[in-house]
Image (spheres, helix red, strand yellow):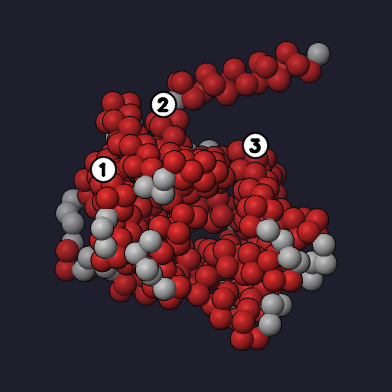
Amino acid sequence: MRAPEEGASFFAMLKRFINNPALFFIYLTIFVNLIGFGMVFPLLPFYAKEFQATEAVIGLLASSFAIAQFLFAPFWGRLSDRYGRKPIISMALAGLSISYFIFAISQSLNWLFVSRFLQGLFSAAALPTATAYVADVTTKEERIKGMSRLGASLALGFIFGPAIGGLLSVQGLQLPFFIASALALINLLSVQLFLPESLAKRSEKLVLKEGFLNIGKMYHGLRGELGSLFILVFLWSYGLSNNQVSVPLLGAEILHLEATTIGIFFSLMGLVSAFMQWFLVDKISQKIGEHKVVILGLTIMAIALFLMSFSTIPLMMAGFMMGVGLGSALSRPNINSLISKQTHEGQGTTMGIATSFESLGRILGPLLGGILFYQFGYHTPFSTVAILIGMVLIYVVVFKKFLKAQ
């Protein structure tokens, strides 16, 4: 009897997507965007070495993406509040297509840096605007489901992207970059044809005196009512990004694992995150409340990260990484939902600021992860981020009355 029910459930979900093309195409936009990103980033060091780049230069090349996101995400968010979501998403996809193409045909390191910075610049437009789009088309009761499924689309794109990129690179390192460019272009066409505009009321004007980079806006956001949530976004991002360097180093140097095995562990973490966000997070949040789920998710994440460095066999490491994926899935969409519900500004502006805090975590995570690992021992990067998350959680719960905000 269960099989017909499951089949009916699947078709019911498909029907809801067809009846709500806005969410379907916004999820597809983010999924394809992350496939393109995932195809590219594992190949970046190998491609840069063809231009005789040193390890330090490769690190700077990789971080230039997050630096561009950090600087420009708030500005793109303000643009989307003024001119609408669809034009900004379209510009983002067009820019990503061009920047991937430039990367593929580059003949010097300088052009690689230009392309990588442009990838971060236009990616900074895509994610906060898509998040604002979900906030536009969902009620407060539906918000957590929309944010969770947006997060699942991110996770799925990140899972499939590296695998596709690895397969395509057999035919040449340039091919994945050409394919990423084509995917962004196809996505742009689908957005133009099928994605309706979501913004009902636009900002009356764009205040350029605030500046393009808008770091001042981040500072005021940190001191405002959403400051605690922005800090939690940063810590979530820092914890995950720390893994990009610390986990491969731990796996290779301490557990003597091959890169393929570590890649499988990351895929398992992503699968747990995607499954939770697509099917369960909204139900859990409606049951016990979004604030409590944020605390629960970050606590699970901190415990899993702390225990990671005590792994003595690969199976333990895989289990702790899946724990990180579980904690991440519970915390991030709920933080997004709370930010979107509590903001008094435009959704695009606020999500742009949140993306900048997330990007700051992506800059510092890999950088500090490597330094702490080599300078202070392999336990240090994991215990540091776990302790930071724990201390901030105590601060927001005890002093900011985080749980009483419900």
Question: Where in the figure is residue 21, as x and y percent of width and height?
Answer: 41, 26
Residue shown at the point (72%, 61%) measured from the top left: 257
Name the image quarter holding residue 259. Answer: bottom right
**Residue designated by label 1:** 94
Q: Secondary structure at mark 2?
A: helix
Pick the residue in front: 193 or 13: 193
Residue 128 marker: none
Looking at the image, is mark 3 or mark 2 earlier in the sequence? 2
Q: Which residue has dot 3 on it?
A: 279
Distance between the alpha carbons at the discs numbered 3 and 1: 32 Å
Q: Observer-nearest residue: 179 or 148?
A: 179
Residue at the location (83% across, 67% down)?
Answer: 312
Give the number of callouts.
3
Tag 3: amino acid: Phe
* Front of the two marks 3 and 1: 1
User: Is 257 on the left or on the right of 137, as rendered?
Assistant: right
Q: Is residue 55 left or right of residue 328?
A: left
Tell me the quarter of the image containing the C terminus.
bottom right
Quadrant where the image shows the N terminus: top right
> Considering the numbered disc 1 on the image, is that residue within a helix, a strand or a loop?
helix
**Residues at circles 3 and 1 in contact by the CB criterion of under 8 Å:** no
Q: What amino acid is at disc 1?
A: Ala
For label 1, the crowd category at 10 Å Cα-Cα, with few meaning under 14, some 14 to 19 and many 20 or more, is some
